[in-house]
Image (cartoon, rainbow, N blue to C red):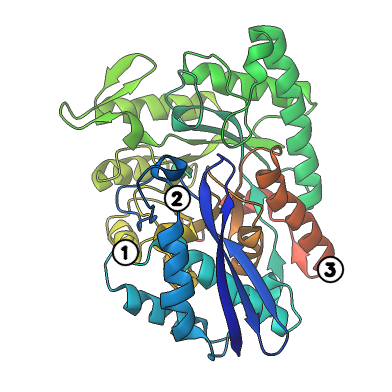
């Protein structure tokens, strides 16, 4: 039974205020969770409530804190913390808007996750076990974003994220080690080739080198994998998050890539050449967030070879996901709890995707905190994938380190899927 709900302001990894909530139960359980924040947000995401005005450049969260402490807390205190669906629906109803703009998705998500953690703690279980029940757990393949571009870095790379996925490992900890070795080798490679400023890092801990073309970034990844002693395409595969809405020009209907203006058809051909030249196994948001048709074309061309992932396309919204399933727009769905606001809605989204054989990738945001809930969520869902940045910067390593603890805890009851994570049930 929930006895106390309390919100406070903390800072996120970009030095902006965010909401942290603590929930205490009468059974002695305690849960604490914080809201992350995106930079390249999808336009259909739930709203992050900010105060405006002068303090914190308008990014204050006093109104969101007020909403937790004085609107939500009185309504959920006294309820059983295990009644996640009821508690989440109470918050959705109290808010009453389609995009959670009254109470704020930042207020709601921190509360929703803190309730789940308090319930798990009351039951004396780690969160991944509380949410995931019994049966074999699946440790996620980390999609490690080690070169940052787009809205996450001050360079000219149009694509936002260049990721490595260490699939040639037997455990998560081994995969993490391989990822770290490649990351450190990449540092040396970039420094030798581009000078010391190339190893400054972006928002997600990846390097932000002064590169001009996306191919240069992919070449650097392949070189770093080889220098670290691994085989690209076998031990380590690649992934990209294009975040194409960021460089789409609605007026002309074109994309500006590597200094060229490309139509959707030309961009599609660009991807087809790219996946022939590089061991790319996932492409996220290859087109503008309303262009389901182009997503579907690329998905059908790359079926069984490369996962096409919807992030800004779906924004963890079940209605947008269902449309994508009907149109066969993607083979995977990104999951960010704060894009929708409640754990219940995020779980419904995940199970809907899985029921249609879409892969689910549990993801952080570019603005993060030390909160490690997504590590537990990825394992509980048996999603097979997590996206939580480079193995650097405390808010990113917090998730990786928690996964190391989880793997230790579930040893003998969990597997690391490696390349099998990519295999569709029916391609
Ligand atoms: P964001 O980016 O958190 O800045 O929205 C992450 C992503 O696009 O996957
Ligand atoms: Zn994305």
- Image position of 397 with respect to 236: above or below: below
Write the residue at 65% across / 72% down.
31
- Image position of 43 with respect to 151: above or below: below
User: Mark 1 = which residue?
Assistant: 322
Measure the alpha-carbon separation of dots 2 and 3: 45 Å
Say what secondary structure mark 2 lies in.
loop
Write the residue at 54% across / 16% down.
216
Left or right, 246 with respect to 376, comes to left
Say what secondary structure mark 3 lies in.
loop
Q: Nearer the viewer, residue 377 or 278?
A: 377
Tell me which numbered mark, 1 or 3, is placed earlier along the sequence.
Answer: 1
Q: From this viewpoint, which residue is outermost toward the left?
A: 251
Write the residue at 80% across / 60% down.
405
Measure the alpha-carbon separation of dots 1 and 2: 35 Å
Q: Nearer the viewer, mark 2 or mark 3?
A: 2
Q: Quadrant of ligand 2?
A: top left
Left or right, 348 with respect to 121, comes to left
Q: Nearer the viewer, residue 286 or 41?
A: 41
Left or right, 372 with respect to 364, comes to right
Quadrant for residue 209, please give it.
top right
Tell me which numbered mark, 1 or 2, is placed earlier along the sequence.
Answer: 2
Write the residue at 69% across / 11% down.
196
User: How many numbered discs?
Assistant: 3
Quadrant for residue 413, please give it.
bottom right
- Image position of 387 with respect to 62: above or below: above
User: Mark 3 = which residue?
Assistant: 412
User: Mark 2 = which residue?
Assistant: 60
Asked if one can make out residue 342 in the rendered structure from this viewpoint, the answer is no
Q: Nearer the viewer, mark 1 or mark 2?
A: 2
Tell me which numbered mark, 2 or 3, is placed earlier along the sequence.
Answer: 2
Left or right, 113 with respect to 59, comes to right
Asked if one can make out residue 387 in the rendered structure from this viewpoint, the answer is yes
């Amino acid at each position: 039974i929930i006895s106390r709900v309390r919100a406070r302001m903390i800072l996120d990894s970009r030095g902006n205020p965010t909401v942290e909530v603590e929930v205490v139960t009468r059974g002695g359980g305690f849960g604490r969770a914080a809201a992350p924040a995106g930079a390249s947000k999808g336009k259909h995401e739930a709203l992050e409530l900010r105060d405006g005005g002068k303090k914190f450049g308008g990014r204050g969260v006093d109104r969101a804190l007020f909403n937790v402490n004085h609107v939500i807390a009185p309504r959920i205190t006294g309820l059983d913390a295990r009644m996640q669906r009821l508690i989440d629906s109470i918050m959705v109803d109290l808010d009453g808007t389609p995009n959670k703009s009254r109470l704020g998705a930042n207020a709601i998500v921190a509360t929703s996750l803190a309730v789940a953690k308090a319930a798990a703690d009351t039951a004396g279980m780690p969160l991944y076990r509380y949410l995931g029940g019994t049966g074999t757990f699946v440790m996620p393949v980390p999609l490690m974003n080690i070169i940052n571009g787009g809205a996450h870095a001050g360079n000219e790379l149009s694509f936002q994220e260049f990721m490595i996925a260490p699939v040639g490992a037997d455990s998560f900890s081994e995969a993490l080690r391989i990822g770290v070795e490649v990351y450190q080798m990449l540092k040396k490679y970039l420094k030798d080739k581009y000078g010391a400023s190339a190893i400054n890092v972006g928002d997600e801990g990846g390097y932000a080198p002064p590169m001009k073309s996306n191919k240069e970034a992919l070449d650097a990844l392949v070189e770093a994998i080889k220098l670290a002693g691994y085989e690209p395409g076998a031990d380590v595969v690649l992934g990209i998050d294009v975040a194409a809405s960021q460089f789409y020009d609605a007026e002309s209907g074109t994309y500006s890539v590597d200094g060229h203006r490309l139509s959707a058809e030309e961009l599609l051909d660009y991807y087809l050449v790219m996946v022939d030249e590089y061991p790319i196994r996932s492409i996220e948001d290859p087109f503008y967030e309303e262009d389901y048709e182009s997503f579907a074309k690329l998905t059908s061309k790359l079926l069984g070879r490369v996962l096409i992932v919807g992030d800004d396309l779906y924004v963890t919204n079940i209605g947008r996901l269902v449309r994508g399933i009907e149109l066969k727009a993607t083979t995977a769905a990104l999951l960010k709890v704060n894009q929708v606001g409640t754990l219940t809605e995020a779980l419904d989204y995940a199970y809907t995707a899985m029921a249609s054989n879409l892969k689910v990738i549990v993801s952080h945001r570019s603005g993060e905190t030390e909160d490690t809930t997504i590590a537990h969520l990825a394992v509980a869902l048996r999603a097979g994938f997590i996206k939580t940045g480079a193995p650097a910067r405390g808010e990113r390593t917090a998730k990786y380190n928690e996964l190391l603890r989880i793997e230790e805890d579930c040893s003998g009851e969990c597997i690391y899927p490696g390349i099998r994570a990519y295999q569709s049930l029916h391609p």
